[in-house]
Amino acid sequence: MTMKLLLAAGLIAACVGCSSKTKMNADIEQRDLFDESDRRSFEQTTEFVDSSEAASEAELRAQQDELKQEFEREEQRLLEERTKLDTENAEKQKAMQREADIKEQLSQDDSLLTQRSIFYDFDSSVIKQEYRPIVEAHGNFLKQYPSVRIRIEGNCDDRGSREYNLALGQSRAEQLKQALVLMGAGLDQIDVVSYGAERPFAFGLDNASRSKNRRSDLVYID
Amino acid sequence: MFSIFRIASVLAKIMCLSTALFCGVASSQVEVEIIADEGSKIPITVLPFEGDGKARLMSEIISADLMKTGLFAIQDVKKDWGRNKLNESEYSDWDSRDVQNLVVGKFIDLDDGRIQGTFWLYDIPGQAMSVGYQIKDDPTQIRRMAHHFADLIYEKITGDKGVFRTKITYVVRAKDQSTLVIADSDGHNPKEIFSTNEPILSPRWSPDGGQIAFVSFLNRKAAVHVLPVDYDRSRVTGKPRIIGPYPGSNSAPAWSPDGKSLAITISKDGKSNIFIVSLEDETKRQITNSRSINTEPSFSSDGKNIVFTSDRTGRPQIYQTSVRTVSEVRLTFEGRYNASPQFSADDAFVALIHYDERKFNVGTLDMKSGVVEILTNGSLDQSPSISPNGKVIVYASEANGRGILRFVSKNGRAKLRYVGPEGDDIREPSWGPFIKD
């Protein structure tokens, strides 16, 4: 629609002016507005108005202009592409280095970050004092690497109501999430789920097994 | 094992081999062990049914049904006579043998391939026939026919409706698989209806028996599913529908009495609260609103109230609220842990689990007196579900490290044990509604 209006405006301008200079000005102005096909149709239309000699001269000049501009554009494009590739490579390398750093830190034997579970008393979601250093280590790590994502999985032992345990596992995981957020981890870095008593780690019915099942696991997501 | 309760006699132990199961288990053994104490019971004599091949099975099923209620004393008679309808002259003979209630019957294979069962219940001291009934059905329905007769006998003598034709559903848990099973309420005819690699918990029958709501996991989060089933035929009739899922963990489904909505628990941002969701458009309305755990809703029979578990005081206890206004009332005060409340059909009591620092047991909370009565003596009893007539509670227990189901009568006098196929870990029972005649 706009194109058609512009074309009509061009035609009127060409008719009124009737000189090659005016026509050329009009031509240059229009070039920015029209794409290839539009311009061609414009030129064809205007041919009726001008003498054929003036037209071919103008056409030649236009073609030269066009080629020059196209060459410049292509040069610019290649330059941009190269810069982009260089930046990408640098970023990739940085990311790889970062990933290697993350992996190394997470797998260092002596690091608290290798401890991914914290354990609870029966029917409690209170994080015990002894697990504070582990929570701090993970919280600081998440703060340092905001791109890292984790999932906290809350679990319970098999005693009591299964449905209550599902909610209790959720509560354990949520409280751990809050603690990590207080250390500086981002809310969107942490997903929280509860398996209740449904995914025991230890299957024994003794106290030792049960205490292993009352836990929250920190799972780093690749 | 049952040292706390004086079990006077082990009345019967029935072993049976069930047929090959739906989901690939080749064959399985179902053990129903009946343990009941003695007390004043209604004497009844069920004579072996007269007739073709399976006639005796009919009378055996009727005897077992009645005995398992803990209300009846089954009297054997030595002399094998009078197996069909009584003559007037026979009353005095039976009376002289101290028989009070007498069941006789016959069973035949009809020419059209169906089976026909007939029974009569006699009140011997009153010298009158109290019930006479005949059913024709498909040969596969022989147990159902016997349960139907037992229902009629039970209702005539006790005045309460029988639950012998009702169904239970429960979960069989294997290492990486959970399976939902529908079985007759006596544990026979287990049919695997739905299997998944994710855990299944909290199956609940809809009030009309046509659907089972349950919780399983979807992308690691608990989600409420509703599975359409054929109650009478113990089979699934469609695919499970997922309700919501609403952000967070969705669990603990409870059917409203009209079957049109579910109360569910949504756990999110450190809170677990109860919502009522419409099954029609899945809109939700919040019922509880506290920063603690609120879960395990159960509707009263008029749908106006729910009981639920909350740890708002730091420990799980049972509360009641109206579904219309905020009116939360605490119901349990004894013990550090009371949970899993289930309203009885007449709202007279709530079944629950109670923990006393040593063991978890199933009990009842009388809604008038507020008294909690403990009915079981296991160490890890959980997931109680009440029969539709309010007389029996089925619950999950364990023996030798695997899950089993146990039944206890509301009066605590009869106890049954239902052990699944060898090695099966069974749990999470839910008792279905009455069969519609």
Image (spheres, rainbow, N blue to C red):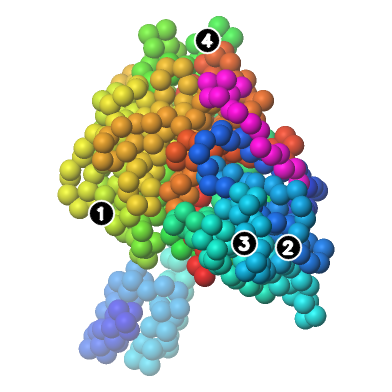
Do badges 1 and 4 share one subunit? no
Do badges 4 and 3 share one subunit? no
At x 34% / y 43%, what residue is drawn?
B349
Discs 1, 3 touching: Cβ within 8 Å: no
Circle 2 crowding by C-alpha within 10 Å: few under 14, some 14–19, many from 20: some
Residue linked to disc 3: B91
Residue B388 lies, in percent from the top left, at 45, 53
Discs 1, 2 touching: Cβ within 8 Å: no
Q: Amino acid at mark 4?
A: Ser
- Of tags 1 and 3, the one toward the viewer is 3
- Of tags 1 and 2, the one toward the viewer is 2
Residue linked to disc 1: B304
Q: Determine whether, in the image, residue A210 is placed left or right of residue B288.
A: right
Q: CA distance from mark 1 to mark 3?
A: 52 Å
Dot 1 falls on which chain?
B
Do badges 2 and 3 share one subunit? yes
Circle 4 crowding by C-alpha within 10 Å: few under 14, some 14–19, many from 20: few
At x 27% / y 79%, what residue is drawn?
A22
Vertical position of residue B184 compared to residue A38: above or below: above
- Of tags 1 and 4, the one toward the viewer is 1
Q: CA distance from mark 2 to mark 3?
A: 13 Å
Circle 3 crowding by C-alpha within 10 Å: few under 14, some 14–19, many from 20: some
Vertical position of residue A19 compared to residue B188: above or below: below
Residue linked to disc 2: B83
